[in-house]
Image (cartoon, grey):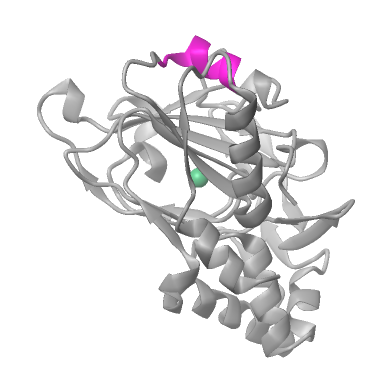
Amino acid sequence: MDLDDYRKALDDLVVDIQDPRALAPSERLAMRERLRRANMVIYRCVAGARMDRTVLAAFTRQLGLGRPDQNLLAANDGLSEVEVKNEGHFSQYIPYTNRSLNWHSDGYYLTGDRIIRTMLLHCMSPAAKGGSLEAIDHRVLYHLLAERDVRFPQALSRRDAMTIPAHHDHGAAREDSTGPVFFVEGNTLRMRYTARQHNVRWSADALFQDALSTLKDLFENHPDLRYRRRLAEGEGILCANVPHRRDAFEDGDKSQSKRLMYRGRFTESLKGTG
Ligand SMILES: [Fe+2]
């Protein structure tokens, strides 16, 4: 892992897209290059490029992604509209409030054939104030952990590393979910993580706890490793489900100043990530 190259990639993460329904070969190549170097890319639809959920589906299909993983709060096409929702059970979930979201990978509670390998967040409309996104390539975290102590990434790769207790809610049930933080599929490193304090059980031994607190330190105290952006209308992040967070935000009174993101979670990998 070349950290200098990673930092350079973060400085040059944006790829302009003329027509999301028909990507040019050069646009695909540019996206793949960012994904290879940083496990993430920011795409920016040029002014006038229309985006709605049908166009978004056409865009992701060209990248080899199938239908987004269906979850309880997603619409029928699998895309979730992440915005402040005051009604019903949405408001119990922090993503659907204007509060900050701590570091996590999407679907960290999923295992087996529902592992989320790709995450997309597309900005239809930014908040009036705040709501910036931050993300880190988990390969960098793994590399830096190993530099501190080779046993740290090993400890976090144990199959009993993280347990999310069973959850029963609104007719949907999920049993205890136990699995590693880091794991490898083929040549691809993946990460499941949540910084939440409640409803997560970690391995308790001293080495594991050292590894975990070192990981938390990397998230909190190394701004040079983080990509930070306040997504504008028409921009989105596509990534290998790298850990990410968001700032709290304030919506304005008009609908154009209310934050609305489309979120897709995919089990497929993006070409170029790894
Ligand atoms: Fe997320």
In the image, 16 versus 217, the foreground residue is 16
Name the main secondary structure of what is drawn in magenta: helix
In the image, 166 versus 116, the foreground residue is 116
Task: Name the side, left or right, on which 5 lies relative to 179.
Answer: left
Looking at this rendering, what residue extends furthest in the front direction?
A: 26
Q: Position of residue 248 (x, y in %)?
A: 27, 51
**Residue 64 vertical position relative to residue 137 in the rendered view, above or below:** above
- Identify the magenta region: 51-59
**Residue 213 vertical position relative to residue 233 in the rendered view, above or below:** below
Q: Position of residue 72 (x, y in %)?
A: 56, 27
**Residue 192 is drawn in which quadrant?**
bottom right
What number of labels is visible?
0
**Residue 168 is drawn in which quadrant?**
top right
**Residue 244 vertical position relative to residue 6 in the rendered view, above or below:** above
Looking at this rendering, what residue extends furthest in the left direction?
A: 253
Q: Residue at x 83, y 63 (%)?
A: 159
Q: Position of residue 66 (x, y in %)?
A: 71, 21
Q: Residue at x 59, y 39 (%)?
A: 30
In the image, 270 versus 200, the foreground residue is 270
> Looking at the figure, which quarter contains the N terminus?
bottom right
Q: Position of residue 195 (x, y in %)?
A: 51, 63
Task: Name the side, left or right, on which 25 lies relative to 151.
Answer: left
Q: Find out whether residue 54 is within the magenta segment.
A: yes
Can the viewer see residue 198 in this picture? no
Q: Residue at x 68, y 64 (%)?
A: 139
In the image, 226 versus 220, the foreground residue is 226
Q: Residue at x 73, y 89 (%)?
A: 149
Q: Find out whether residue 256 is within the magenta segment.
A: no
Can the viewer see residue 86 in this picture? yes
**Residue 258 is drawn in which quadrant?**
top left
Looking at this rendering, what residue extends furthest in the right direction?
A: 186
